[in-house]
């Protein structure tokens, strides 16, 4: 079933608390869901602390990287007394490598990388480690890699929540037809999401409770390609579908656009992930059934705490933060990890995300959704 973690839930929370992370759900002023949310500090190493390089993968598939991760990592790293240089590779492997070269040359003491692909991330980690720079895989584990630590959410659990949400939304409709639109084949997280989904859905397919029409991975998590691919599968199936597993909110949005073209939006259960403003608004409209909320500040603070410890050469303290392990099957090694708990969000629980400060009510409450916002107390 792919990489699994050891020790979840309360044990993880106790370990994280013991390490002094102080993981908070709300960040004042960092709840925006659009690029450029990092303010003046994010993106440039201009302070007087220890230099740390951070490379994020892209901006096209999800608003999270610039809207959430960038400002939250900047804040968390500065709180550790570090001077972060946070850059985005914009989906370009060569740019990812070039950014890494520049950071290594500038004298960063730690690198945090959210890779576009395992091969690209591993190449960068190898160059950094050759210069004695410890590397943290952020959000995505590089299979066959050499990074010292891994910080993410329990990604199989994310997929399981998507499967549970789909089943919950479809309800008791024997033989309901399902189309799966999955993430990039080069992204290990996409594989873990799929594995988690199948823990719930495969038994349903085998029993006939659900019928799988087709499952398709989408290169580079490209939303436009995802929408086009879904439409081809839908029309090839005679325009019939009851549920769609969309691996994230970006793909879900593209799928909802296609469903609307055929008058099916609001009639088909669509999953998602990342709790973006667009995804939450679609849930309030009834076009998307669920998303998965991953409190990214927790991920950013865990990565920052690890980086702070590693910059001081205190691996014992770092090991006290990364109390779990994930199996890298390609590299045949166990990677010291921090795995955090994701949350299932449906219409009735959208308020959890706004209350936590990740998305503002003004971003999701509009003419189409105001009645639902009022009913749910979102303001």
Image (cartoon, helix red, strand yellow):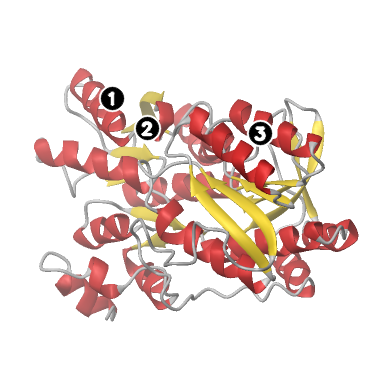
CA distance separating discs 3 and 1:
32 Å
Residue 181: numbered disc: 2
Residue 360 pos. (x, y %):
32, 72
Which image quadrant is residue 351 in? bottom left
From this viewpoint, which residue is outermost toward the right? Answer: 316
Q: Quadrant of the C terminus?
A: bottom left
In front of the other: 78 or 335: 78
Q: Are marks 2 and 1 in contact (CB under 8 Å)?
A: yes
Residue 104 pos. (x, y %):
68, 42
Residue 218: numbered disc: none
Q: Are marks 3 and 1 in contact (CB under 8 Å)?
A: no
CA distance separating discs 3 and 2:
30 Å
Q: Quadrant of the N terminus?
A: top right
Q: In the rendered image, which residue does mark 3 sit on?
A: 124
In front of the other: 192 or 175: 192
In front: mark 3 or mark 2? 3
From this viewpoint, which residue is outermost toward the top? Answer: 236
- Name above or below for residue 32 compared with residue 153: below
For residue 152, side relative to residue 279 (left or right) = right
Which residue is depicted at the point 45% across and 79% down?
A: 28
Could you classify mark 3 by the number of other residues whose Cα lies within 10 Å: few (under 14), some (14-19), or many (20 or more)? many
Which image quadrant is residue 73 in? bottom right
Give the mark nearest the N terminus, 3 or 2: 3
Q: Secondary structure at mark 2?
A: strand
Give the mark nearest the N terminus, 2 or 1: 2
CA distance separating discs 2 and 1:
8 Å
In front of the other: 270 or 296: 296
Residue 137 pos. (x, y %):
66, 44
Q: Secondary structure at mark 3?
A: helix
Q: In the rendered image, which residue does mark 1 sit on?
A: 229
Q: Secondary structure at mark 1?
A: helix
Whether residue 208 is visible to the viewer of this picture, yes or no, is no
């Amino acid at each position: 079933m792919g990489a699994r973690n050891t020790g979840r839930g309360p044990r993880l929370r106790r370990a994280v608390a013991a390490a002094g992370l102080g993981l908070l759900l709300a960040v004042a002023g960092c709840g925006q869901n659009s690029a450029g949310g990092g303010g003046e500090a994010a993106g440039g190493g201009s302070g007087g602390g220890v230099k740390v390089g951070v490379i994020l993968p892209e901006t096209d598939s999800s608003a999270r990287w610039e809207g959430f991760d960038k400002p939250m990592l900047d804040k968390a790293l500065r709180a550790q007394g570090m001077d972060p240089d946070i850059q985005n590779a914009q989906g370009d492997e060569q740019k990812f490598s070039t950014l890494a070269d520049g950071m290594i040359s500038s004298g960063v003491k730690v690198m945090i990388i959210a890779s576009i692909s395992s091969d690209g991330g591993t190449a960068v980690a190898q160059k950094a480690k050759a210069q004695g720079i410890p590397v943290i895989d952020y959000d995505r584990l590089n299979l066959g890699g050499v990074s010292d630590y891994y910080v993410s959410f329990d990604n199989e659990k994310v997929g399981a929540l998507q499967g549970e949400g789909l089943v919950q939304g479809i309800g008791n409709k024997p033989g309901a037809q399902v189309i799966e639109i999955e993430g990039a084949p080069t992204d290990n997280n996409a594989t873990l999401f799929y594995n988690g989904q199948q823990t719930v859905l495969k038994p349903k397919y085998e029993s006939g409770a659900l019928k799988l029409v087709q499952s398709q991975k989408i290169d580079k998590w490209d939303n436009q390609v995802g929408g086009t691919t879904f439409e081809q599968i839908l029309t090839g199936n005679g325009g019939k579908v009851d549920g769609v597993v969309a691996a994230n909110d970006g793909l879900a949005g593209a799928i909802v656009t296609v469903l609307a073209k055929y008058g099916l939006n609001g009639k088909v259960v669509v999953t998602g992930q990342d709790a973006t403003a667009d995804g939450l608004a679609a849930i309030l409209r009834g076009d998307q059934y669920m998303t998965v909320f991953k409190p990214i500040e927790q991920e950013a603070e865990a990565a920052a705490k690890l980086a702070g410890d590693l910059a001081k050469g205190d691996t014992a303290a770092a090991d006290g933060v990364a109390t779990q392990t994930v199996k890298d099957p390609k590299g045949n090694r166990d990677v010291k990890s921090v795995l955090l708990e994701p949350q299932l969000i449906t219409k009735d629980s959208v308020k959890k995300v706004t209350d936590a400060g990740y998305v503002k009510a003004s971003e999701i409450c509009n003419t189409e959704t105001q009645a639902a916002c009022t009913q749910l107390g979102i303001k």
